[in-house]
Image: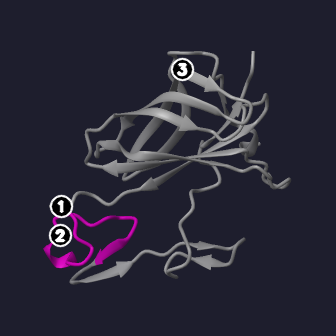
Amino acid sequence: MHENLKFNLVPANKDVWQPIIAAQAYGTFFGVYIQFCDVQSSSTSDKHHCMFKIQNFRGPITLGLKGPVQINADLNPNPKDPIDFDIILGIEPFSLCSDIEVAELDFQKDFGNGMIVDVKYQLKDPPGFLYNKDDLNGSRYLNPYEYYRDGDNYLKVCFKDEALGTDSCDEAAGTKGGICDMTRSIILMP
């Protein structure tokens, strides 16, 4: 059931904030929204002037957006996981940057009804005056996604992806959101 719960995106609804993420990080529940302002279409791609906004709903730490926003268009979608576009943006703790304006977001192909957009967010480190991963004893704050405190010791946090057989403590592996993160949207055309 949870894999069918997605947001709907309607690029034709200009100047309307549309949800693309509902998630939690650093103990704060937040939502990210996109606003399609203008589009320049060609025979090979759609270039959108967009704005992004983060709304912190509950939690102790203010989260902000950190650019640049990236687009990856999967021109040959995997039939088992048919994602047509990835939108990748940064989420930064202790940040007051609630908006990002993108003058031109090139989706590299035309939108079509039923296409799937997956929004990925990368958790950025807290500001350097609070957190220094190279000097944990001198840090005022520990990034809970990287370390736990154990008295005078620090334990590194690792995530293992059983399906891929990767471990985030391996340098080559990356971290991945949980399966119930609301990060996927379906494009609806009028």
Judging from the image, what secondary structure is the residue with disc 3 in?
Answer: strand
Magenta part of the protein: which range? 130-149
Quick check: marks 3 and 2 in contact, CB under 8 Å? no
The answer to which image quadrant residue 78 occupies is bottom right
Q: Tell me how many marks there are.
A: 3
Residue depicted at 42% across the width and 47% down the height: 68
Q: Is residue 170 left or right of residue 100?
A: right
Q: For residue 163: magenta?
A: no
- Residue that lies at the very extreme toward the right in this rendered image: 79
User: Who is closer to the viewer here, 96 or 14?
Assistant: 14
Residue depicted at 78% across the width and 53% down the height: 81
Residue 142 spot, x, y in % from top left:
27, 67
Judging from the image, what secondary structure is the residue with disc 1 in?
Answer: loop
Which residue is disc 2 drawn over? 139
Q: Which numbered disc flags the more N-terminal residue, 3 or 2?
A: 3
Q: Which numbered disc flags the more N-terminal residue, 1 or 2?
A: 1
- As measured in the structure, the alpha-carbon distance from the residue carrying label 3 to the one carrying label 2 is 44 Å
Task: Report the magenta stretch's main SS.
Answer: loop
- As measured in the structure, the alpha-carbon distance from the residue carrying label 1 to the one carrying label 2 is 6 Å
Residue depicted at 17% across the width and 78% down the height: 137
Residue 73 spot, x, y in % from top left:
67, 47
User: Who is closer to the viewer here, 100 or 181?
Assistant: 100
Which residue is disc 3 drawn over? 38
